[in-house]
Amino acid sequence: MDVREFIFKKRGYTPIPLGIVIIYFSELQFFLMFIGGTIIFLGEFIRLKSIRYAGGSTRTTSVGAPELCSDGPYSHVRNPLYLGNIIIYIGIVIFSGGGDLLFEILVVTLIFFIIQYSLIISLEEEVLKKKFGREYDIYSNSVPRLIPLILPWKGRTIINPRSWRKTLMIERRTLQSMSFSLLLILLREFFK
């Protein structure tokens, strides 16, 4: 098995050791909790908007997509879910305070996700190029991987997004995991 496939399949579990480090070194400060919470909200908003357009195909263990999604957030950036995840984890690190190691934990978090998503994105791009050919080539040459365009790509295929209710149902596992992580950070502070 290609290491990229393994990481793709386990991507929901690979950040657990990082989460343990974040919780262990947490030192809550109200100001950082507010800033971190705001950043977490932004990252989750990006994820929710992305899921409205891509739907349940974002919760798979096999690489691929039933159709090439190029509308909504996907008309600004090719990997908005991963961008949202990175923003959420940056927010969680800041929320936790990180004590004297806040900067170091932020750097490790960024390096971790850069490596993980570089591997996953390279695999996904290979699969999407095979499946969608020229359509994907045009899209990938027009829309950046992780740094969003300010204006949406003009060549997007307009679709009707899913309802917010369906979107929240699809996203419930991430919301539960994020809530659990924040609860553990709060409990760690309470039991110090």
Image (spheres, grey):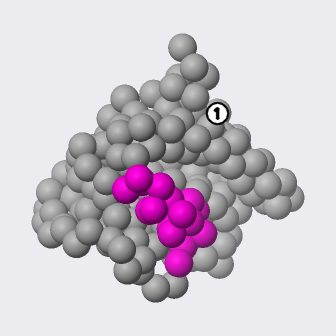
- Asked which quadrant contains residue 101, the reply is bottom right
Picture layout, residue 20 above or below residue 101: above
| Position of the N terminus by quadrant | top right
- Asked which quadrant contains residue 60, the reply is top left
Picture layout, residue 88 above or below residue 192: below
Tell me, yes or no, if residue 185 can be seen here: yes
Who is closer to the viewer here, 32 or 177?
177
Q: Which residue is mark 1?
A: 17
Tell me, yes or no, if residue 92 can be seen here: no
Q: Residue at x 82, y 61 (%)?
A: 103
Q: Residue at x 61, y 22 (%)?
A: 3
- Residue 72 at x, y = what percent? 32, 72
Q: Amino acid at mark 1?
A: Pro
Q: Residue at x 15, y 57 (%)?
A: 166
Picture layout, residue 135 above or below residue 191: below
Q: Residue at x 86, y 58 (%)?
A: 100
- Tell me if 48 is positioned left or right of 24 in this view: left
Q: Over which residues does the magenta segment extend?
A: 134-149
- Residue 176 at x, y = what percent? 35, 47
Q: Residues within 10 Å of mark 1 (few under 14, many from 20)?
A: few
- Tell me if 26 is positioned left or right of 131 in this view: right
Who is closer to the viewer here, 134 or 27?
134
- Residue 33 at x, y = what percent? 59, 70
- Residue 32 at x, y = what percent? 66, 72
Q: Residue furthest top?
A: 1
